[in-house]
Amino acid sequence: MRVPYGEDKEYFRFSLFLVLCNRIITSAVSGGVLLISEKTLIPAAPMHKYCAVSLSNILTTTCQYEALKYVSFPVQTLAKCAKMIPVMVWSTIIMQKKYNGKDYFFALFVTLGCFLFILYPVSDDINPNQIGRESTLWGVTLMIGYLGFDGFTSTFQDKLFKGYDMEIHNQIFYTTLCSTFLSFCGLVVQGHLLMAIDFMLRHQDCIFDVLLLSTVATASQFFISYTIRTFGALTFATIMTTRQLVSIMLSCFWFSHPLSWEQWFGAVIVFGTLYTKSFLRSNQHSQLPLVQTNDENKTQGNSNS
């Protein structure tokens, strides 16, 4: 989306075509896994529910790719740090989950820590305020759309996994199959399908890039679905949020980039918040058996008397 192809410096402008290629490969792989493992190809849920996930997933990916035309990549990375908040809102609406003030407090602190880390680098090459693509109003709108649709997608996937006890490959297969159909129809309506194919035929190095992107997107989809099914949408959002910080930290250490004091402070906030949350949760679990044992002892004492 940001690097021109060929001597005439043409840019690839067809975001929906990238979505189509990603979904074709993902549906083919997941369908192949279902056939090889001799698992059922019958949908575990009504098709309109797969289509709801597909539509929101297409809108998520399209907003993400389109936003790169209007905002810098670091700004997009910064916006992704706010993933936890939309997931909590959608979980309350869709799954009737109740979060207390402590949960929102932890989510806000993790988001704040990541904001500090990305906004105040020492090195200019990862500064979102550097000269380049400015954060236009349309670009910011696309990122808000990305966060909203992404939060809905992971939350609704979580609801399907819990409500129908479906297998991971079953959901991936039917979701990506619907996405393939919807993105194909969108390209035909826009008149971009043949234009995208023509672009790739004229710039064949673009074919390799699209295949590489689709392969990585397919692999990541299986990790995403497994995480959501096993741990839930909020845990997935937490992982994705902290990943932004960890990847930049690793980059800084690997390439010997210094960290500013704001970045160290942001890192302490994020990891301190996550550690505190984990410690409090494990403390609650360790106290449960003790409470149950005391209750049982009281019951036995009453029966003996």
Image (spheres, rainbow, N blue to C red):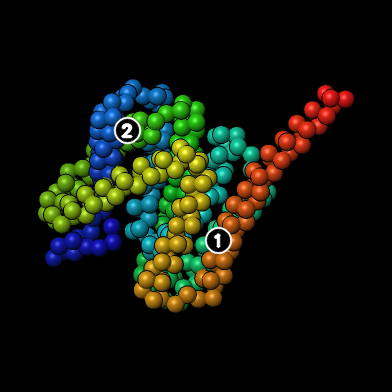
Q: Amino acid at mark 2?
A: Phe
Label 1 Cα crowd, 10 Å radius (few <14 / some 14-19 / many 20+): some
Nearer to the camera, 110 or 200: 110
Q: Residue at x 57, y 66 (%)?
A: 268
Residue placed at 54% from the left, 40% from the top?
90
Q: Residue furthest right?
A: 305
Residue 41 is left or right of residue 155, and the answer is left
Q: Quadrant of residue 37?
A: top left
Image coordinates for residue 83, horizontal then vertical, percent: 50, 51
Estimate the x, y position of residue 13 in percent, counting from the top left.
26, 53
Q: Quadrant of the N terminus?
A: bottom left
**Residue identified by numbered label 2:** 173
State the image coordinates of residue 161 (x, y, percent, origin top left): 46, 32
Give the vertical position of 303 relative to 117 (above or below): above
Q: Mark yes or no: residue 73 visible.
A: yes
Q: CA distance from mark 2 to mark 1?
A: 36 Å
Q: Which mark is residue 66?
A: none
> Could you tell me which residue is drawn at 12 percent across and 50 percent down?
201
Image location (x, y in percent) of residue 93: 57, 36
Whether residue 27 is visible, yes or no, is no
Of residue 207 and residue 271, the one placed in the foreground of this image is 271
Q: Going by the image, does 178 lie left or right of 287?
A: left
The mark closer to the camera, 2 or 1, is 1
Earlier sequence position, callout 2 versus callout 1: 2
Callout 1: SS = helix
28 sits left or right of 74 in the view: left
Task: Name the kind of residue labelled 1 in the image.
Answer: Phe
Q: Secondary structure at mark 2?
A: helix
Q: Residue at x 55, y 49 (%)?
A: 85
Q: Which mark is residue 271?
A: 1
